[in-house]
Amino acid sequence: MKIFRLMPLSVCDTNSYIVAADSGSCVLIDAPDNAEYIMEQINILGLTLKQILLTHGHFDHVGAVADLVEMTGCEVYIHEADLSKLEKGDGALGRFFGSSGFKPYSGAKTFTEDDVLTLEELEFDVLHTPGHTSGSCCFIIGDCMFSGDTLFARSIGRTDMPDGNYELMKQSIEKIYELGGDLKVYPGHMNTTTLEAERHYNPFMSHLGDL
């Protein structure tokens, strides 16, 4: 398995990641914008896009989905609670951020808590982490976690937008805190971090050690 981080995309500088299997097939974690750039990078790496896994349904994480499916025929997966954001644009929040041209996509497959999403030897465990949206999720593979807009380096995702819920976010952060061991964290925005660093230094998480 190899992980490649793409440049931040969309008006929100959103991260996305390519996870490559040994065969050259790959999974894309989130598809923020600019399908042409994403495909260019996948082609440069000599990979074949087979799946897109979406951490949640906001426009800056799903904006390139429809175009990428048209280009490659890849499968798309999203939590069932955020499906309508992808299918109808409801709650995708493009207008909220002044972004236009969002293309809905209606062919996604859904998953729920504790599902395992697989591509060849790649196995992603689903951790449902509502709070930023009702369908927000993290994907864990090996010692890596793709945390979407749930956990950031020294921060967490916003909960003040439609479908956000701070009480649920607190529960999700506690769930992540209690995961065993350390994980390298690949967030939806800003820099990578580690779970152990966030346990110690993230103000939304560090106090949990005192409970």
Image: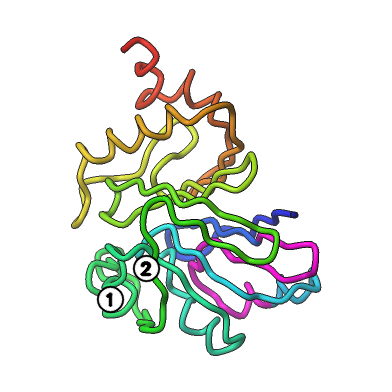
Looking at the picture, which amino acid does disc 1 mark?
Answer: Gly
For numbered disc 1, what is the local secondary structure? loop
Q: First in sequence: mark 1 or mark 2?
A: 2
Q: Which residue is drawn at 57% across and 26% down?
A: 181
Magenta span contains residue 134: no
- The magenta segment is 19-39
| Quarter containing the N terminus | bottom right
Q: Does the magenta stretch include residue 31?
A: yes
Q: Residues within 10 Å of mark 2 (few under 14, many from 20)?
A: many
Image height check: is 14 above or below 48?
above
The local crowd at label 1, few if under 14, some if 14 to 19, many if 20 or more residues have their Cα within 10 Å, is many
Q: Quadrant of residue 206?
A: top left
User: In which quadrant of the rendered view does residue 108 lie?
Assistant: bottom left
- Residue at left 29%, top 71%? 85
| Left or right, 74 with reference to 98 | right
Tell whether 198 sits left or right of 210: right
Return the residue at label 1: 89
Going by the picture, which residue comes out furthest to the bottom? Answer: 70
- Which residue shows up at 54% across the image and 47% down it? 140
